Image (cartoon, rainbow, N blue to C red):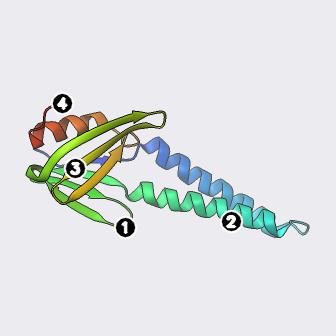
Amino acid sequence: MAIRTYRTRLSLRLALVVAAALWGGVLVLLAGLPGAQASSVLSAAAFLGFFLAFSAHHGRLAIVARPDGLVFRSFFREVPVRWEEIVKVDVHTGLAGTLYAVLTRRGQVQFSSLLARHRELFALLLERAGLARS
């Protein structure tokens, strides 16, 4: 099995970077405007911070499928999971998309339909962990 990396959809990552750049521009314009209220500048800074944080989060978010298991990678942690440690995968669908909760012997990790090729990853999970589709 070749190593595969599943990342957040490129369109979402690009949209977050563009939004951060837009709010950075708004912040610079407001900061240089003589009559700008402090609350407006703080609001622009808050939006910039929000989009920078989510851009960094989704830029780092990935699941790497290797011959021996998966590595769930987020902004703050990296969790290796061997195929035989996967006990169950719960799928929850809703208005915001699909959430896949992967129960392992070491705890739960999850991913969502924001990942490109998430259905392919789900099928690979079931196949390699020897689980049945419910």
**Which SS class for mark 4?**
loop
**Which SS class for mark 2?**
helix
**Labels 3, 1: front one:** 3
Which residue in the structure is indicated by mark 2?
A: 45
Q: How would you rate the neighbour count of disc 1 (Cα within 10 Å): few for under 14, some for 14-19, many for 20 or more?
A: few
Q: Earlier in the sequence, mark 2 or mark 1?
A: 2
Q: Earlier in the sequence, mark 2 or mark 4?
A: 2
Residue in view at x 79 percent, y 69 percent: 31
**Which SS class for mark 1?**
loop
Q: Which mark is residue 133?
A: 4
Q: What residue type is labelled 2?
A: Ala
**Labels 4, 1: front one:** 4
- The image shows residue 101 at horizontal and vertical percentages of 29, 46
Judged left or right of residue 46, residue 126 is left
- The image shows residue 71 at horizontal and vertical percentages of 22, 56
Q: What residue type is labelled 1?
A: Phe
Instruction: Work out how far the residue at label 2 is from the one at label 1, CA to CA, in angstroms.
Output: 23 Å
**Labels 3, 2: front one:** 3
Q: How would you rate the neighbour count of disc 4 (Cα within 10 Å): few for under 14, some for 14-19, many for 20 or more?
A: few
Q: Which mark is residue 103?
A: 3
Q: Which of marks 4 and 1 is nearer the N terminus?
A: 1
- Residue 64 can be seen, yes or no: yes
Judged left or right of residue 132, residue 108 is right
Q: What residue type is labelled 3?
A: Leu
Instruction: Work out how far the residue at label 3 is from the one at label 1, CA to CA, in angstroms.
Output: 20 Å
Q: What residue type is labelled 4?
A: Arg
- The image shows residue 32 at horizontal and vertical percentages of 82, 69
- The quarter of the rendered structure image containing the C terminus is top left
- The image shows residue 46 at horizontal and vertical percentages of 66, 63
Which residue in the structure is indicated by mark 1?
A: 76
**Labels 2, 4: front one:** 4
